[in-house]
Image (tube, rainbow, N blue to C red):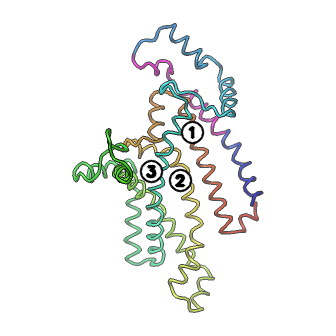
Amino acid sequence: MLRFILFRLLHAIPLLIAVIFVVLLMLQLIPGDPVQAMVGDFPVSPEFRAAITKQYHLDASFPVRVYSYFVNLLHGDFGYSYQFQRPVLDLIVETAPRTILLTSVGFLIAIPVGVLIGIISGTTRNKRVDHFWTSLALVAYGIPIFWLGQLLVLVLAVHLGWFPTQGMGPLVSHAHGFAWLRERAHYLALPALAFAVHEGTRFARIMRASVADTLGQGYIITARAKGLTRWAIIRKHVLRNSCLPLISVAGYVLGSALGGAVLLETVFTWPGLGLLLVQAVRMRDNMTVVGIAIFAALAVIVINLVVDLLYAAIDPRIRGSS
């Protein structure tokens, strides 16, 4: 198993380097003046421009800046945000737990609901129950997540007044303990629900197809011939063998979402990595953009490694093939 982990890590290192280089190159090609973006619409004097250019090494060539960034990165320095006047690593450490909280709660809802719907649809193929859940999942998955979020805000927050429209908590709060958690859960409900609906329908469709394929295998026919009940077949054979595709997709979705659920956090003004990324792009804060891209790449790589380990634990043939 250790050899398997090292093999995956060795493949991840060049991928991470390539991601950093591509992001730096894209930022280099984007038109705009970072010094002007720092001060906004105010005029920039030549002295101020020269001082900022020297302080942040904006006058260096692209290869030199790439080399300097990789050297600093090896020392744990993700750069300094001249817009937020803080180290980029501090910004990521502050906002990443909020994104992790949002995606984790969404997954805790999406996975069991999606798996249940997928099993129901897969075991009742071409029947009314299957047609109902399949059609509902297709319609729900086809709705863009930002539009779904706005719809939930209009219906559940604006018209019914059940939930707040945006933010992570009230501007002034005197709650403590369980009351504080309940207050935050009230703000978390709508974005987590939007995330769960969108991703849960994806899981349902994948699980439905996997269950239908598993039920057609020869060992399932043999199990039926032995007299096993329907529930016993599902529990002992179908669930274990149908979860491999779901694990792969769940790992990809979780890894990318941890890098910042940009659309979702923007709609609900959730102060996570996604909203920070949007603000950094608007203000031409390149160091923050690169730092978030690195965090997103690391999240995808780590989650994919965990998925590979789960695959290897479930199916030893995968571990042996590496």
For residue 136, which numbered disc appears in the image?
none
Position of 65 relative to 289 (above/below)? above
Mark 1 surroundings within 10 Å by alpha-carbon count, few (fewer than 14), some (14 through 19), many (20 or more): many
Measure the alpha-carbon separation of dots 2 and 1.
Answer: 15 Å
Picture quadrant of residue 42: top left
Name the element at disc 2: helix
Tell which of 37 and 124 is nearer to you. Answer: 37
Q: What segment is highlighted magenta in the picture?
A: 18-41
Q: Which residue is mark 2?
A: 254
Q: Secondary structure at mark 1?
A: helix
Which amino acid, mark 3? Leu
| Closer-to-camera residue (159/74) | 74
Mark 1 vs mark 3: give the one in front. 3
Lower position in the chain sequence, tag 2 or tag 1: 2
The answer to whether mark 2 and mark 1 are in CB contact below 8 A is: no
Give above or below for 189 relative to 81: below
Left or right: where 226 falls relative to 154: right
Quick check: is 20 in the magenta stretch? Answer: yes
- The residue where tag 1 is placed is 293
In this view, 18 is above or below 299: above
How many angstroms separate mark 1 from mark 3 (CA)?
19 Å
Spatial CA distance of label 3 from label 2 is 11 Å
Task: Residue under label 3, please give it.
Answer: 102
Quadrant in which residue 1 is drawn: bottom right
